[in-house]
Image (cartoon, rainbow, N blue to C red):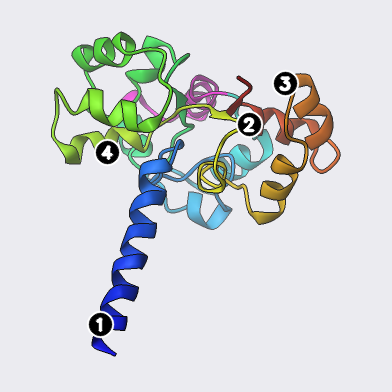
């Protein structure tokens, strides 16, 4: 019995680890495009008016768009660090601008150079390995919360797909149903059967076809 229990624990740990290794979208922060109003009200410097504005404006197509909205609502530059410690629109590691990367709290010009140096990223594991040359594991994990590597629609695992914020088992089935995808236009057309154009555009940020 003890052996069986130990084996069960080991298997569970292995599954958690494999999911962590596979993940292509960082976890840990609220995604302003999918978070509930209650969750957003817990973000520093947010009030009911700002939260309702976020919900009304989303989805935000980029972190730059989210930043522009917040500053228009009177969030001061010195307050943004507190906000972005809780909620952030994930950055595509292969296309994010210097200005967007510098929105990650406590990230300086040196690390921006390192982010750029290793493009194009093929997997989150590559990001962890390369950034681990410069900072410790804790800091790599912190930075990882803010970024993603686009998921190959035709080869991504279930675990990879499910890291997309707000994507559950139903949409996982739809993502897989139309494989192999020949073009991003096909993705838009097929997934557009289930969600509106804004949601298709939000999901499209996280995928690629290779």
Per the rendering, the mark at residue 184 is 3
The overriding secondary structure of the stretch rendered in magenta is helix
Q: Which residues are magenta?
A: 62-79
Residue beneath disc 4: 142
Per the rendering, the mark at residue 153 is 2
Where, by quadrant of the figure, is residue 77 drawn?
A: top left
For the residues bearing labels 4 and 2, Cβ distance under 8 angstroms: no
In terms of sequence position, does the residue under pointer 2 or pointer 3 come before the other?
Answer: 2
Q: Is residue 79 visible?
A: no
Tell me which residue sits at (29%, 68%) in the image.
Answer: 10
Per the rendering, the mark at residue 3 is 1
Q: Is residue 12 magenta?
A: no
157 or 184, nearer to the observer? 157
Measured Cα–Cα span from mark 4 to mark 3: 31 Å
Measured Cα–Cα span from mark 2 to mark 3: 9 Å
Classed neighbour count for the residue bearing mark 2: other residues with Cα under 10 Å, few (<14), some (14–19), many (≥20) = many
């Amino acid at each position: 019995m003890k052996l069986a229990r130990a084996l069960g624990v080991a298997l569970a740990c292995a599954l958690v680890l494999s999911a962590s290794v596979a993940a292509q979208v960082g976890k840990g922060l609220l995604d302003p495009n999918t978070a509930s109003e209650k969750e957003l009200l817990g973000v520093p410097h947010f009030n009911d008016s700002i939260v309702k504005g976020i919900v009304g404006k989303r989805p935000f197509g980029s972190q730059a768009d989210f930043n522009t909205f917040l500053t228009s609502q009177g969030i001061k530059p010195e307050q943004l660090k507190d906000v972005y410690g809780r909620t952030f629109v994930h950055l595509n590691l292969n296309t994010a601008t210097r200005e967007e990367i510098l929105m990650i709290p406590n990230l300086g010009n040196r690390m921006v150079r390192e982010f750029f140096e290793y493009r194009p990223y093929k997997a989150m594991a590559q990001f962890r390995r390369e950034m681990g040359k410069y900072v410790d594991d804790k800091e790599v994990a912190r930075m990882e919360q803010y970024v993603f590597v686009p998921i190959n629609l035709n080869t991504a695992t279930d675990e990879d797909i499910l890291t997309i914020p707000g994507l559950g088992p139903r949409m996982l089935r739809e993502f897989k149903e139309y494989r192999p995808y020949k073009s991003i236009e096909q993705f838009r057309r097929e997934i557009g059967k289930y969600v509106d154009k804004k949601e298709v555009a939000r999901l499209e940020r996280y995928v690629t076809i290779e």
